[in-house]
């Protein structure tokens, strides 16, 4: 779907990839409803948008709060007149530990945000999107949603759930005017570890991430927006995600071992 003159909702618009999506969308002539639990993050996004900041409305909503999510479409319509696109970007990671060492509250939180929150948002906005001449739902899974990453097993399972949910939605909406795009980012340079409450900024700064080649968040947003414009089915963000998509099909066990060898230093 085109970007210009469309209204997009972007969850997680207060940081990282979501922030870059919001800024690039308004620069391309869209209007955006940014949704986040971080008020400070969204204020910074609006500030960074400069003179285009007035094209952005901000909504402090926890996407796991079904009542708040249900009330959101009318608020977005009140702010912008309509809604054409939903980018389900908000997400969190889990502590870098094995499943045996995770608590149930930690497990539930990851699923609540990454899967249930995304599903609430989709359910709340879909009836409105179905009434538009053209509309688009874009869901962020992860390279970890098709490839096992040790120390992120529950995160990966939640992103695999996003994958099948989104592909099922795509099929169900094939005879409608609602496009559905599924995004698999590889490693992206954002502050997701701190934002997810997994590490402090100090701990992150001490960590040597030199061995990981990461895609910049603005580049990731550019690739996602190009996928939206092409009505792409799948969008792989970064050479790591593209490469592992082939390797995991060709030699799944070898692909899993390769990622284990790369990630084992992060496992406590
Ligand atoms: N960074 C990566 O390497 C990477 C890789 C693969 C996939 N992803 C996915 O990309 C998406 C964006 O990640 P990012 O790296 O930009 O993260 P980020 O931490 O920079 O931004 C995520 C934003 O989501 C918001 N958020 C968290 N929980 C929320 C909730 N319950 N309700 C509303 N907002 C909430 C946070 O406040 C934050 O502003 C996530 O879904 C993530 O899983 C990221």
Image (cartoon, grey):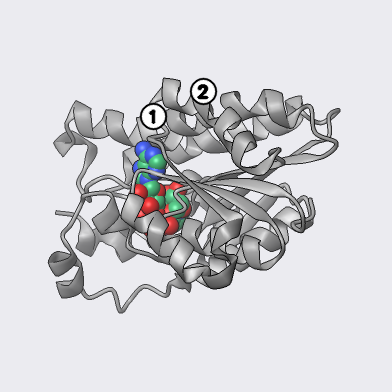
Give the residue displayed 72% in from the left and 32% down from the top.
Answer: 129
Name the residue nearer the viewer: 265 or 57: 57
Measured Cα–Cα span from mark 2 to mark 1: 11 Å
Residue of label 2 = 70
Secondary structure under tag 1 reads loop
Q: Is residue 122 visible?
A: no
Secondary structure under tag 2 reads helix
Give the residue displayed 46% in from the left and 40% down from the top.
Answer: 159
Disc number for residue 139:
none
Give the residue displayed 14% in from the left and 66% down from the top.
Answer: 203
Spot occupied by residue 94 in the image (x, y as percentages of width and height):
27, 45
Give the left or right position of residue 107, taking residue 15 as reference. left
Q: Is mark 1 within 8 Å of ligand 1?
A: yes
- Crowding around mark 1 (Cα neighbors within 10 Å: few <14, some 14 to 19, many 20+) is many
Residue of label 1 = 64
Q: Nearer the viewer, mark 2 or mark 1?
A: 2
In this view, 238 is above or below 112: below
């Amino acid at each position: 779907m085109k970007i210009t003159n469309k209204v997009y909702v972007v969850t997680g618009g207060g940081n990282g990839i979501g922030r870059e999506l919001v800024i690039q969308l308004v620069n391309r002539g869209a209007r955006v409803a940014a949704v986040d639990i971080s008020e400070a993050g969204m204020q910074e996004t609006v500030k960074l948008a400069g003179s285009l900041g007035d094209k952005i409305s901000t909504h402090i909503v926890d996407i796991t709060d079904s009542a708040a999510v249900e009330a959101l479409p009318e608020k977005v319509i009140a702010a912008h007149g309509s809604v054409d696109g939903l980018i389900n970007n908000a997400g969190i990671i889990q502590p870098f530990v094995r499943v045996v060492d995770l608590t149930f509250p930690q497990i539930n939180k990851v699923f609540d945000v990454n899967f249930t929150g995304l599903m609430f948002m989709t359910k709340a906005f879909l009836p409105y999107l179905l009434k538009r001449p053209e509309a688009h739902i874009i869901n962020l899974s992860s390279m970890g949603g098709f490839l096992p990453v040790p120390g992120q097993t529950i995160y990966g399972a939640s992103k695999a759930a996003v994958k099948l949910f989104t592909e099922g939605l795509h099929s169900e909406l094939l005879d409608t005017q609602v496009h559905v795009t599924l995004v698999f980012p590889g490693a992206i340079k954002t502050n997701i570890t701190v934002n997810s409450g997994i590490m402090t900024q100090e701990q992150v700064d001490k960590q040597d991430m030199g061995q990981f080649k990461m895609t910049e968040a603005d580049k990731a947003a550019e690739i996602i927006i190009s996928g939206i414009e092409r009505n792409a089915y799948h969008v792989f963000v970064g050479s790591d995600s593209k490469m592992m998509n082939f390797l995991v099909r060709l030699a799944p066990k070898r692909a899993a071992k390769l990622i284990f060898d790369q990630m084992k230093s992060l496992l406590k």
